[in-house]
Amino acid sequence: MYEVFLSKIKEKVALTREEEAEIAAHLTHKTLRKRQFFLQEGDLCRYIAMVEKGALRTYVTDMEGHEHITSFALEGWSLGDLCSFLKEEPATQNIEALEDCELCLISKPAHETLLQQMPKYETYNRILMTEAYIALQKRTRDMISLSPDEQYKAFVNVYPNIVQRVPQHMIASYLGLSPETLSRIKSRISQHK
């Protein structure tokens, strides 16, 4: 159990068997059914999750009730409302299972304990946060500087697994496009192949 979580850490830092056991002792498991929420806006995010199996989406709802997808998560990806988790304030995002999911969870107290007691876990966490910040900066830049066609091509290139598993209207939402606009973009791209 927790193989995906531990393997993701070991991609960044070497762990002894004892360190693996110590980390695993702080983890819990959760199963979600399709359309079940991991987190809803207004709740406190008590856990950060690593996806062992399945796919989820994170979205916010605007004042008119429209959903805007901010991220997806597949196997090996972490997710949670980081502001809510770290600052212990109500979540501003919803996280919903798009498929049946198996999640590996770490609570804030367990996370803090590992950060304080295990330098390798702290190093892994720092690397993860740095990579997340870089990805956010790149996404922000792409949304400003790329055309919708270029944004979609970049998305397909970077996230081919998401394209295969997530409905097109959700990809359109993530890219800030209407489903109709995304359909036209896909048609133009296929004509130029």
Image (tube, helix red, strand yellow):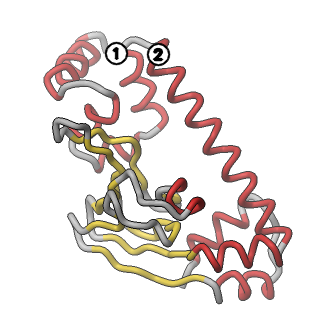
Residue drawn at x 59%, y 30% is 137
Labelled disc at residue 165: none
Percent position of residue 78, x then y: 52, 59
**Taking 129 as reference, is 74 left or right?**
left
Q: Quadrant of the C terminus?
A: top left
Percent position of residue 25, x then y: 65, 89
Label 1: how many Cα within 10 Å (few below 14, some 14–19, many 20+): some
Residue drawn at x 39%, y 75% is 102
Q: Residue furthest front?
A: 89
Q: Residue furthest left?
A: 180
Mark 1 and mark 2: span between their CA atoms? Answer: 13 Å
- In the image, residue 170 above or below residue 182: below
User: Quadrant of the rendered structure where residue 41 is?
Assistant: bottom left
Residue drawn at x 59%, y 71% is 5
Residue position marked by numbered label 1 in the rendering: 149
Q: Name the amino acid type tagged 1.
A: Asp
- In the image, residue 93 above or below residue 180: below
* Contact, mark 1 vs mark 2 (Cβ under 8 Å): no
User: Quadrant of the rendered structure where residue 60 is?
Assistant: top left
* Labels 1, 2: front one: 2
Residue drawn at x 48%, y 58% is 79
Q: Name the amino acid type tagged 2.
A: Ile
Labelled disc at residue 144: 2
For label 1, the SS is helix
Percent position of residue 93, x then y: 37, 52
Label 2: how many Cα within 10 Å (few below 14, some 14–19, many 20+): few
Tell me which numbered mark, 1 or 2, is placed earlier along the sequence.
2
